[in-house]
Structure formats: structure tokens, C-alpha cells
Image: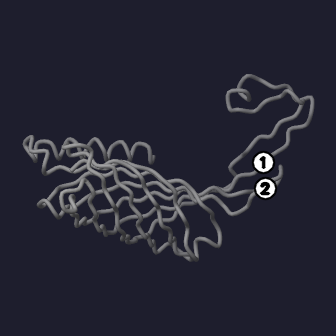
Amino acid sequence: MFKHLFLSTIVLSAAGLTPMYGGDFNKFNFNIGGGVTTPLNPTANYVGLSGNFAVGAGYNINKHNSIIGEFQWNGLPPNQVIQLPGLPFGNINLYSITANYRAHKDRIGHSPFGVYMIAGGGWYYRHISIDKNYLVPPGTVCSPIFIWWGYGCETGSFIVTETIAQKGNSAGGFNGGTGFTIRLSDTGWKFYVESRYNYAFSNRVATTFIPVTFGFRFN
């Protein structure tokens, strides 16, 4: 579902923006990157550090103000370190689609360095699955399908993971943060580092985290 949603967002954005700008790419902006996500309380009571991925596209109102539509994924792994066969464990993925405003200064003086502030809000979807490991007894015949999924039979026994429950939770939320850019030559491309606070009004326990993202921006 989310793979198709992600690909559709990129294709529709590109298809819709190109004719609108009539080839004036100074009005078009794009970003893609990834990094590390740090959960904050109360989320930090249940999950640990994870990775993130973000991609966005939008319109430059002028040389200092832009609007951006962005898709982001954040993994939220449980704090548990060791999972023994037979015990359940959780897996959480957070997906978001947001609309954001970015105020930016692309050149500080005559240097290639820039700075910006970004804030916005949108839809956050937290998908939770609970899995369980099962230890298959020694002597069980190992068919090729087990090898395909990464289970080996060299020792005569192996572990199979089964999803026993899953649930999704949608909520509205907002974000805000700052970023720094380094212009790459005289092109519209820039390397960026960004830190952004996110708060989603998820059911029962709010989702709060700060992703630090490294990537590339165009315009």
C-alpha cells in the first residue's frame, strides 16, 4: 500500500509541476534524504533510535519562500534488545505526508552556505505489527522456500517468524525545525542537514520524535 502511495506521490508531483512551470525550474524545488530518528517522551519510553527517509517537491514563491509537499518514513524499533524464540516482539513504522512552508536564505554573504526554517503539518500513520518467533524442531525437512526467506537448516533446526497481530493508527500532526545547506558549484543543487521536531496526536500515546536528515535539495 505505502509503496504504491509513495511512488504515486512522486509521479503525480512531477507530472503536475512540469507543465505548471513551463520549464522554469527556478520555481520548482525537490529534496531527498535520509538519516537518524531520535524518539522523545512519551514515545521514547517504548522505542529507540532508528532510521528515516524523506522525499518532497514543491513551489518556490520567491527566492526566500517556498512551499513543499513531503513524504517521510521513520522506523520506530522497540527498546527490547534480545528476543528469544517463542516470545512476541513489536515492529513499528511511521509514515507521514505533510505540507510545509520553508523560509530560506541560500547564501550567507558570498559563501556557499545557507540556512532555513521549515514548519508544517499533515497526516501521520503509525503501523504496528506484533510478531512471534517459533523454533522448528531438529530433523524438520528444509524445503527451498525456507532458504529463499533466509532460514537455514544446517544445524537441523531453524526459527520462523509469524505475524500474530497488526494495527494502524492515523492522526494529524505538525512539525518544525531548521536546516543548513551547502551549494554545489553554481547549480541549483545543495547538500542539506536538517533537524525537525514532529508531534502527532496518535491515539492513547502521542508520537514525538526528531529526525536528523542528510540529503540533497534542488533550488
Q: Residue at x 47, y 62 (%)?
A: 211
Could you tell me if the residues under marks 1 and 2 are in contact, i.e. CB atoms within 8 Å? no
The label number, if any, that marks residue 82 in the structure image: 2
Q: Mark 1 points at which residue?
A: 133
- The mark nearer the N terminus, 1 or 2, is 2
Quarter occupied by residue 40: bottom right
Position in image of residue 161 (x %, y %): 73, 44
Of 116 and 43, the residue lying toward us: 116
Quarter occupied by residue 122: bottom left
Drawn side of residue 199 relative to residue 67, left or right: right
Q: Name the secondary structure under disc 2.
A: loop
Quarter occupied by residue 75: bottom right
Q: Residue at x 18, y 57 (%)?
A: 110
State how far apart marks 1 and 2 are (Cα): 12 Å
Q: Residue at x 27, y 45 (%)?
A: 184
Position of residue 153 relative to residue 20, above or below, is: above
Position in image of residue 1 (x %, y %): 45, 46
Identify residue type, mark 1.
Asn
Position in image of residue 49 (x %, y %): 59, 60
The label number, if any, that marks residue 166 in the structure image: none
Identify residue type, mark 2.
Ile
Position of residue 217 relative to residue 38, above or below, is: above
